Structures are given as structure tokens and as C-alpha cells.
Image (cartoon, coloured by chain):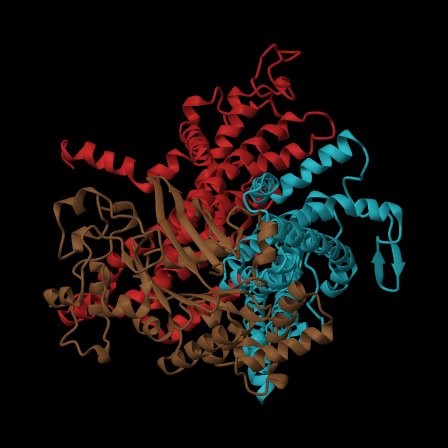
């Protein structure tokens, strides 16, 4: 079996505060293989973006990696100095941010932003960098790339800007792309195009993609596997069809219920009661137990089991078995 | 864009008209010009004659228009105290103030921006913290105390630099410059540091806070995520964006230097316009006060206009309508 | 406030984030302590000062130029911080001078605050032409350094005051001049907040039941703008103290008959060369401590109340 592109082991991100150590990411492990799209879902505050930022080393102080290891193509990168890490950023790990309106420097033409990135990592001549910049814009579907290369970000529409952002993230041909809510800030009509673009580029280049989103619909369409996060922990991890078709963690099951999936033909939407607990106020035992319809005494005392491996399994003491469990809820 | 500039010019003129009105009202209503110009022994005939000569018998609007017309031609009347035309007095004094302002302005700009960027990039470092704390003392220190302190150290104790005056000056046409003699240059050092220090700390603190704000932006994170060098992130991406909001304030601060020169000139007995103005206040020499007010307003308004135009040069977003028009 | 609720309320205040920040910030503690100390010293100056420097009976010209903490060569009198040319005790003149400085400072800020809040409220609430005029004046004034505005107002006021009243009016002129030069910040904050509150339902409701929405708004706006106004006021106080000292130093502020710290420094500057450094030094250090403490306090307040600014 080939080595995964990204391998995260027992990752803990911690924030020291006046009230003690908070752990927005608490013991998360997963792999992403070449050409694979891993969707990471969860409510806001579940730690999904934090995980992506930890991988590329862009955690905002005072947040920091507390424990765990991160491997990129077999090399450990979580303990690198900032200077060493910089060589990986852009070159091996591309990142796409949520809001294309704010991700681009408003005062520099997009061509300049592309060529500086290309030259930084590939060390090619000016004219070669220019050619590659045009090619990169072409590839993400910017019409008339040659003429548009001198334009400023504000001269593009939101969807076009996100294409530029993707071109920037991919122009040095990284093996891993972290896309942090890449469609959330876009019009619904544009979202599908951007997702299709990401999917196409991943297939063509054989990149590993970590797609962070709170949108189950996007995951269902795009991802190969899905990681569901709740309160900093992995709740469930597995092939997208299995997780969506037969969720084994009650939280995933609830999440499915909250997502309108026409194809599933559900009668009505049901919501998970309550809210995700704040980091400082995590309950004892399994963090989900106050909202879980199947809570047992054990759930209130023992923290949920940690997900270690990457086959479809839920971090739950009493995972739902087969599709009939879903019926039991409704 | 053209429409915008025209509108700004129009607004500036409006401001000048209002300031002119203030200056004129001072001129007309504060104290009695007749009292000020005629001595104790005066007859009603003298008073009437002067009233007609000065045009004080005409309607307010006419007087105001005349005042503006005269001011536009550089005619601000005669100083009550010196009995000479205000324009002449100011022309004699202007080079001293302008040279001082030029040196301290450059000092404040270069050092202020440099330190601001440094403290922003090295936020939390020891050097930055020391600079920031010192700068707070700099802001709290009244300008005149800085001047006195410098005089005490470098003139009284060490005897290195002169404590007052401009030193030797050279006459170039109508301009007397201190740049060409060594005593003139030496005399410039202490006053220009005194004058520039406050603006320098302000510019530094502003550049720092704006830069910290910019460094938090998504596009900076994105630039980092693309693996650009810190130097490129800081200077190519952050600094330029920092300068957009900073330019206004820096422009105004440079204008303020001329105004703050009043204090420095008093401390160092620097024979400039500021010293002239403070003496005018002490002796209620209204024509000089009015002229100073008008001049400094013209300057401020001019700086404001230039600042607005600079925005267009720096920020492409503002050029949209210009480009597609 | 009952006796029972008092401790819990105190305990709550002690436990709040604000109090926590205060307790853990040496800068905040030291600067507020220094400010408090100086304000108290100024308030109780007549009780603390060994001599009344403005009572001619207590002065002895022979005591002139006595260095600090050394007996005078003629009279043998000793003064902690020395004496000036007239034989006045420098320590006492500083205490009395600080009274003037602080009085002008507080009064000018209070004046600016009342004026700014009123104009801001009117501008925000009435809108239209009134707002345009008020805010345009504010904009124009903001382009001029406030010390210059204060100087001009002083000059004009002097022109209006007959010569024989100029000295006695000087303090009031100072307060008005500094206050007028500093209202803009307050007005801007209050106007912004008013614009937000104006369209809320309770104001509409107040209008319907015929109550003056103006007073109701004031009640709702003041709590909202309390922390920015507090920050602006503290920083303004430091600026006002410096402005007063500057004007007095330039000879257009407090007169020699009622010297503030700035006037004392102006007087002392003349003796710098002849070696009587203490006449200038001690007032200067006092002014510095005062301005610095208030400034640091204001700076800290701004950071503590607006975490976003850090």
C-alpha cells in the first residue's frame, strides 16, 4: 500500500487561558491518500478549521500544537521551525481560504501575486513565471487569462476571485490542498462550479485534498471519505457513502437528519436538541451525551473512545448498528 | 475621479471661506482697530477719516469681500505692534520656520515609519516593548520639556550645541537659509529633534497599530500559507496596505509640525513665524493673528488635497471609475 | 445599597475581567496610584504645603535662591525643594501650581465632554442640516491641531477682555479654550451611538406615547458610550494638562499671579543657565509624572475596555 500524503496522529491543539488549558482539537487522527478528498465536517467551533491550520502551521497565537504528530509524505512536519515550514507552505501544502474577497491583497495585481509565489518555490525566470501564471489562471477557468493577469482583485467577481485563490494555492503544484470552507462565502450558483473545479484538479493532479466545511451536501457530492468532528474530537470517520448512508455515531445521525437531502426522501427535518458545548464547559464523559438520544450511564462517565484507525467506525460506546437504527430515531 | 477632485477642491474653498470669515471677524470685532491704530490724542475727525480709509463704514459683506481680496493678494494689513505690513514680516520669518519644519518632518517620517514597522513585525519582542514604552513617554512629554531637557544636556552641561537662534544664515535672494553654514546646521539640530519627536512617536504608533491590523488580515495569512518569505509578507504585502490609512494622518501630522513649531520656536527663540504668532497673541496683535490663521489654513487644506490625491496613486480600488470612464 | 448586597457586589466587581486585568497590570496600578496621590496632594495643598506662597507676609526676599535641602546662607531657613527668586518655597508653589493645572484640566475636559455629548446627541438625533453643520465643523476643527485652536481662542478671548481683567479671567479663558479645542472626539462617539439607537423600537414607542425620546435616548445612549467616553476623557485629561502647561509656558495661559506648573517652568527656564536648576526641575518632574500617569492610565483603559485594539 502506498504511503498516505498526509498523516495526522493524535493531534491536540491547545489554548492556554486564564481558566486553564482549552483543547479546540483533542486527539484527532486521520490519513489522506493521493488523489483522495477527505471531507471534514462539524458545527462551527468543532475544531475543523483549527485542524487544517495546525497542519500548515498557521495557528494564531496563543493556540499551539500540544501533542501529536503530523506527517507529510512520510516527513514529520509538526515540529519544524517556522523557517523550515515555510518551504512546505505553498510548495507542498496549498491552502484555500473561505472568503475570496479578503484572501487576495487588494493592492497588487493578481499576476504579481501569482508570479511571486511561483518564483519563490520553483525558482524559474521572470518570463517562465509569467507563462506559468497565465497557465495557472487558464487551468482554473479564468477566461482570457493573458489579458486579465494585470487586473486587481476588485475587478473580479466573487466566484472568479475564488478561482484566482485556487490558482494561487495550486500554482506551485502541492501534493496536499487544505480547502477551508472554500464555498461558504460564495453565491449558491457559484458554489457547485468551485467544488467541481476542486474535484477536477484533485483527480487530474492526484492531489490529496482536505475539504473543511459545515455543509454535508458539499461533502456528499465531493468527498471520498468523511471525518465528522464534534467538540474537538473525531466522532466518526469513514467512506462517505457508508457514513451518510448508515451513520454509526448518534451525532452523525443527527447531523444527517438536519441536512436536507432530497434523495434520501426523509419525511421531515429533525434537529439535534441543544447546542454544542463551549470549550470551557465540556461535560464529563462523552462530550455529546447531553444531546444524545441514546445516552447510557457509561456515556456520562467515560470519555468516548478515541478513533485511531481510518476505517469507518464511530467514537461511541454504543454505536448504531445498521440502517434500522436510523428508523428507531424517527 | 475628476468629479471627485473638483468636489474636494470646492469643499476646500468652502473651508477657506469659513476660516476667512473667522479671521475677518477677529479683525473686525476683537478690540477696536481704530483704538489700536490711533494714539491717545485723537480727534473725532481723525477717527472718521481712518474709518473711511479702512472701509469700516461699509456693509459687513463688502468689508469681508475686501478682506478676502486683500488676503488673496497677500495683503493682511499692518501689524499693530510693529507698524509694518504683516506680509513683509511673515515673509522675513517664513524661511526659518519652513527649514525647521522640513528637517523635523523628514526626521519624523523616516524614523517614525521605520520604528512603526519594526515594532509591528517584532510585536512582543524586548526591543519593541522598550520602544513602545519609550514612545509613550515621548507622547506624554510636553514638547517644551523635551526642548528644555535637550538644552540642558547639550547646551548647558555639554556645551556642544547652541541653545537659541538660527546661527549664521546666508541670504539667497529673498530667502535666508541656515543650511549653508556650520553654525546654522548646528543650530538646527536641537530644535528639529524637539519638534519632530512628538510627530515621530505619533507616526510610529499609528504605523504600528495599522500594520498589526493588516497583519491579521486574510490576505496576509494567505501570503504566509503560500510560503512567501517573511520579508516579502511584511514589506511587499503588509506595508503597502498599512500606508493607505496612514497617509491621511501622516499628512496632517506634517501640517501640524508647522503649528507645533510655535512651541519649539519659543523654547529656542527661533526667529520664525511661530514665535511671531505667540508674540502676537500676547500683545493681541490681531492682523498678525488673522494672517497666521489664514496662511496655516491654506496650508492644511492644501495638504488635505494632496493626501486625497495620493490615495488614488496607492489604492487601485479608488481608480475604478477613472479606469472605466 | 443595603449592607448585605454590598460585599457580594464588591466581590463581583473584584472578580470581573476588568478588575482582573487591573490587578495583573503593574502599569495600571502604579499609574492610578500616582494619579490619585497627585490629585489628593493638589486638593489638600493648603493643608500640606508648609507655606502659602501667595501670602506676601510669609515671604522673605533674603530666602531667594536657596538650594534644596540646604540652609539659606543668610537666614538659615531650610526648604525641601529650595526656593525661587522671590524666596517662595518651591515645594509649596508646586502643590498650589498643580491645583491650578488639575483644576483647568478637569474643568476643560468636563466642558468638552458636556459640549461634545450634547452636540453629538443633537447631531445624531436631529440629523439633516444640523448634523451636517455640526459634523463639518468637527471635521474642519479636527484637521487643526487642538493646541493651535486653543491658542487662537485664547488670543481672541484676550482681545475681548479689557486689559485690567485679563489676569483674573485667564483661568476661565484657559478652560474654555482647551475645552472648545477638544469636544470633537466625544461628539463623534456619541453621534455614532445615537444613530444606532435612534431607529430602535423603544424610541419609536416613546414617541408614540408622547414622551420625549430625547431624554430616553440619553438614558440609553450614555450606558452604551460610557466606556469609550471614559477612555477619551482620561486621554483628554492628559492632553488638557499638557495643553494648559504648554499655553502657560508660552506665556498665554495662567498668569504669574496664579502660576500653574507650566508658568513655574516658564519662570524656571530663565535660571537654567545660572545654575538654579531646582526652580525648573521640580515643577517639570511633577508635570511629567502627572501627564505620564494619566496618559498611561488612559492607554491602559483603552486596551482593557477594547480588547480588539490590541
In this picture, residue C206 sits left or right of residue A122: left
Q: Looking at the image, which is closer to me, B188 or A295? A: A295
- Rendering coords of residue A191 (x, y %): 39, 78
Residue at image location 33% in from the left, 38% down from the top: C19
Q: Which chain is cyan?
A: B
Quadrant housing residue A179: bottom left
Q: Residue at x 52, y 81 (%)?
A: A156
The image quadrant of residue A217 is bottom left
In which quadrant of the rendered image does the N terminus of chain B lie? Answer: bottom right
> Chain A is shown in which shade?
brown
* Residue C143 image position (x, y, % from top left): 55, 63
The residue depicted at 46 percent of the width and 38 percent of the height is C102
The answer to which of B171 and B209 lies nearer the viewer is B209
> Of all residues shown, which one is farthest toward the front?
A1
Return the residue nearer the eye: C112 or A275: A275
Vertical side of B274 occupied by B269: above or below: above
Q: Residue at x 32, y 56 (%)?
A: A46
Task: Look at the picture and state if B204 lies above or below C258.
Answer: below
Point out residue A141 in the picture as x, y percentages from the top left corner: 52, 83
Evaluate whether residue C153 shows in this view. Answer: no
Chain C colour is red
Amino acid at each position: 500500500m502506498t504511503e498516505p500524503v498526509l498523516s495526522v496522529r493524535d493531534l491536540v491543539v491547545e489554548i492556554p487561558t486564564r481558566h486553564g488549558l482549552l483543547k479546540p482539537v483533542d486527539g484527532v487522527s486521520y490519513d489522506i491518500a493521493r488523489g483522495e478528498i477527505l471531507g471534514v465536517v462539524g458545527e462551527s467551533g468543532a475544531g475543523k478549521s483549527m485542524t487544517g491550520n495546525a497542519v500548515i502551521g498557521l495557528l494564531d497565537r496563543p493556540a499551539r500544537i500540544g501533542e501529536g504528530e503530523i506527517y507529510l509524505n512520510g516527513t514529520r512536519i509538526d515540529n519544524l521551525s517556522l523557517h523550515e515550514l515555510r518551504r512546505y507552505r505553498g510548495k507542498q501544502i496549498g491552502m484555500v481560504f473561505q472568503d475570496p474577497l479578503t484572501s487576495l491583497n487588494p493592492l497588487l495585481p493578481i499576476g504579481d501575486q501569482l508570479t511571486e509565489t511561483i518564483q519563490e518555490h520553483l525558482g524559474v525566470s521572470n518570463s517562465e513565471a509569467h507563462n506559468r501564471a497565465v497557465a495557472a489562471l487558464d487551468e482554473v477557468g479564468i477566461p482570457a487569462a493573458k489579458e486579465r493577469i494585470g487586473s486587481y482583485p476588485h475587478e473580479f467577481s466573487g466566484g472568479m476571485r475564488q478561482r484566482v485563490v485556487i490558482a494561487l494555492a495550486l500554482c506551485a503544484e502541492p501534493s496536499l490542498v487544505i480547502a477551508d470552507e472554500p464555498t461558504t462565502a460564495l453565491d449558491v450558483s457559484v458554489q457547485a462550479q468551485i467544488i467541481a473545479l476542486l474535484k477536477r484538479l484533485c483527480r487530474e493532479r492526484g492531489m490529496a485534498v482536505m475539504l473543511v466545511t459545515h455543509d454535508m451536501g458539499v461533502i456528499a457530492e465531493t468527498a471520498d471519505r468523511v471525518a465528522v468532528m464534534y467538540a474537538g474530537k473525531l466522532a466518526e470517520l469513514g467512506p462517505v457513502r457508508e457514513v451518510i448512508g448508515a451513520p454509526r455515531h448518534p451525532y452523525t445521525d443527527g447531523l444527517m437528519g438536519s441536512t436536507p437531502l432530497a434523495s434520501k426522501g426523509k419525511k421531515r427535518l429533525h434537529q439535534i436538541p441543544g447546542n454544542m458545548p463551549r470549550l470551557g464547559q465540556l461535560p464529563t464523559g462523552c462530550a455529546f451525551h447531553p444531546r444524545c438520544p441514546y445516552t447510557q450511564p457509561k456515556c456520562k462517565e467515560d470519555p468516548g473512545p478515541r478513533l485511531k484507525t481510518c476505517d469507518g467506525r464511530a467514537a461511541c460506546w454504543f454505536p448504531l448498528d445498521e440502517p434500522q437504527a436510523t428508523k428507531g430515531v424517527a | 475621479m475628476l468629479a471627485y477632485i473638483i468636489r474636494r477642491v470646492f469643499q476646500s474653498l468652502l473651508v477657506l471661506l469659513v476660516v476667512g470669515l473667522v479671521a475677518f471677524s477677529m479683525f473686525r470685532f476683537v478690540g477696536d482697530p481704530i483704538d489700536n491704530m490711533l494714539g491717545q490724542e485723537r480727534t473725532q475727525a481723525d477717527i472718521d477719516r481712518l474709518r473711511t480709509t479702512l472701509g469700516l463704514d461699509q456693509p459687513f459683506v463688502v468689508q469681508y469681500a475686501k478682506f478676502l481680496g486683500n488676503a488673496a493678494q497677500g495683503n493682511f494689513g499692518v501689524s499693530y505692534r510693529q507698524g509694518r505690513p504683516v506680509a513683509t514680516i511673515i515673509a522675513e520669518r517664513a524661511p526659518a520656520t519652513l527649514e525647521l519644519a522640513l528637517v523635523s518632518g523628514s526626521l519624523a517620517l523616516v524614523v517614525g515609519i521605520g520604528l512603526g514597522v519594526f515594532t509591528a513585525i517584532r510585536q512582543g519582542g524586548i526591543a519593541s516593548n522598550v520602544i513602545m514604552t519609550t514612545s509613550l513617554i515621548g507622547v506624554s512629554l510636553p514638547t517644551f520639556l523635551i526642548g528644555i531637557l535637550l538644552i540642558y544636556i547639550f547646551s548647558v552641561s555639554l556645551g556642544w550645541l547652541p541653545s537659541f537662534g538660527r546661527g549664521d544664515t546666508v541670504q539667497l535672494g529673498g530667502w535666508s537659509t541656515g543650511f549653508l553654514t556650520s553654525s546654522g546646521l548646528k543650530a538646527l539640530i536641537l530644535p528639529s529633534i524637539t519638534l519632530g519627536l512628538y510627530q515621530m512617536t505619533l507616526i510610529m504608533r499609528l504605523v504600528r497599530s495599522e500594520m498589526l491590523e493588516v497583519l491579521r488580515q486574510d490576505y496576509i495569512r494567505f501570503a504566509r500559507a503560500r510560503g512567501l518569505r517573511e520579508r516579502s509578507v511584511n514589506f511587499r504585502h503588509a506595508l503597502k496596505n498599512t500606508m493607505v490609512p496612514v497617509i491621511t494622518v501622516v499628512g496632517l501630522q506634517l501640517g501640524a509640525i508647522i503649528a507645533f513649531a510655535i512651541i519649539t520656536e519659543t523654547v529656542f527663540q527661533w526667529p520664525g513665524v511661530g514665535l511671531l504668532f505667540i508674540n502676537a497673541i500676547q500683545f493681541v496683535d490681531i492682523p498678525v493673528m488673522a494672517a497666521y490663521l489664514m496662511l496655516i489654513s491654506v496650508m492644511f487644506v492644501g495638504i488635505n488635497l494632496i493626501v486625497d490625491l495620493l490615495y488614488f496613486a496607492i489604492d487601485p480600488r479608488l481608480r475604478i471609475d477613472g479606469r472605466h470612464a | 445599597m443595603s449592607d448585605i448586597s454590598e460585599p457580594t457586589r464588591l466581590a463581583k466587581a473584584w472578580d470581573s475581567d476588568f478588575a482582573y486585568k487591573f490587578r495583573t497590570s503593574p502599569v495600571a496600578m502604579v499609574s492610578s496610584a500616582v494619579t490619585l496621590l497627585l490629585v489628593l496632594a493638589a486638593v489638600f495643598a493648603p493643608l500640606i504645603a508648609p507655606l502659602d506662597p501667595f501670602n506676601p507676609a510669609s515671604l522673605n526676599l533674603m530666602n531667594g535662591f536657596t538650594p534644596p535641602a540646604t540652609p539659606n546662607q543668610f537666614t538659615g531657613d531650610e526648604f525641601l525643594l529650595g526656593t525661587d527668586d522671590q524666596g517662595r518655597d518651591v515645594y509649596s508653589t508646586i502643590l498650589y501650581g498643580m491645583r491650578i493645572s488639575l483644576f483647568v484640566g478637569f474643568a476643560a475636559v468636563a466642558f468638552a465632554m458636556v459640549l461634545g455629548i450634547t452636540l453629538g446627541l443633537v447631531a445624531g438625533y436631529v440629523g439633516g442640516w444640523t448634523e451636517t453643520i455640526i459634523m463639518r465643523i468637527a471635521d474642519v476643527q479636527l484637521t487643526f491641531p487642538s493646541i493651535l485652536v486653543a491658542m487662537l481662542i485664547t488670543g481672541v478671548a484676550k482681545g475681548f477682555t479689557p486689559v485690567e481683567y485679563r489676569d483674573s479671567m485667564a483661568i476661565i479663558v484657559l478652560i474654555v479654550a482647551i475645552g472648545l479645542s477638544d469636544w470633537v472626539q466625544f461628539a463623534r462617539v456619541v453621534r455614532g451611538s445615537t444613530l444606532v439607537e435612534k431607529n430602535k423600537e423603544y424610541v419609536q414607542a416613546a414617541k408614540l406615547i408622547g414622551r420625549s425620546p430625547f431624554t430616553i435616548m440619553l438614558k440609553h445612549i450614555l450606558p452604551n458610550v460610557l466606556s469609550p467616553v471614559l477612555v477619551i476623557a482620561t486621554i483628554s485629561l492628559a492632553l488638557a494638562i499638557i495643553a494648559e502647561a504648554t499655553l502657560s509656558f508660552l506665556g498665554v495661559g495662567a498668569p504669574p499671579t496664579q502660576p500653574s506648573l507650566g508658568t513655574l517652568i516658564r519662570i524656571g527656564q530663565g535660571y537654567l543657565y545660572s545654575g538654579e536648576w531646582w526652580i525648573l526641575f521640580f515643577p517639570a518632574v511633577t508635570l511629567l509624572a502627572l501627564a505620564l500617569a494619566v496618559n498611561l492610565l488612559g492607554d491602559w483603559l483603552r486596551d482593557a475596555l477594547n480588547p480588539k485594539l490590541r
